[in-house]
Image (cartoon, rainbow, N blue to C red):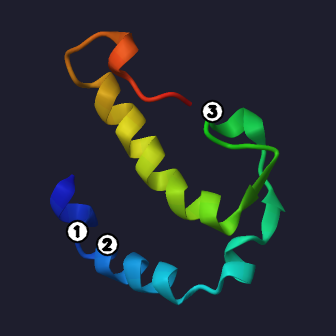
Amino acid sequence: MRSSIAPLRPYLSRRLDAEPDVELARTMYFPVRWDPFFKDAMTLEDVYRYPTRHFDFHRAQLTLGTPSSWPEA
């Protein structure tokens, strides 16, 4: 999995660095029933953070450990 997302990281990092604060604050409706990390309204900054939170959550599910070590939704 790590190798499949590796080429995207520099691209996304450059895009994020180039986004003005006013753009990062733009909001859009998201259907909360689709994913526990979705909020009714999410900013572009939230959208940039979503894949990492989603991946970390599922990685924790697949890692031996206790639920108390899992990230909060």
Q: Which mark is drawn over residue 36?
A: 3
Where disc 3 sits, the SS reads: loop
CA neighbours of label 2 inside 10 A, class few (<14), some (14 to 19), many (20+): few
Where disc 2 sits, the SS reads: helix
Q: Name above or below for residue 49 compared with residue 57.
A: below
The residue where tag 2 is placed is 9
* Quarter of the C terminus within the rendering: top right
In the picture, residue 8 is in which quadrant? bottom left
Q: Name above or below for residue 64 compared with residue 32.
A: above
Q: Position of residue 70 (x, y in %)?
A: 38, 23
The residue where tag 1 is placed is 6
| Horizontal side, residue 41 vs residue 24: left or right | right
For the residues labelled 1 and 3, the Cα–Cα distance comes to: 25 Å
Q: Position of residue 17 (x, y in %)?
A: 47, 83
Verify CB contact (< 8 Å) between mark 2 and mark 1.
yes
Q: Position of residue 28 (x, y in %)?
A: 81, 62
Verify CB contact (< 8 Å) between mark 1 and mark 3.
no
CA neighbours of label 3 inside 10 A, class few (<14), some (14 to 19), many (20+): few
CA neighbours of label 1 inside 10 A, class few (<14), some (14 to 19), many (20+): few
Q: Name above or below for residue 22 compared with residue 40.
A: below
How many numbered discs?
Answer: 3
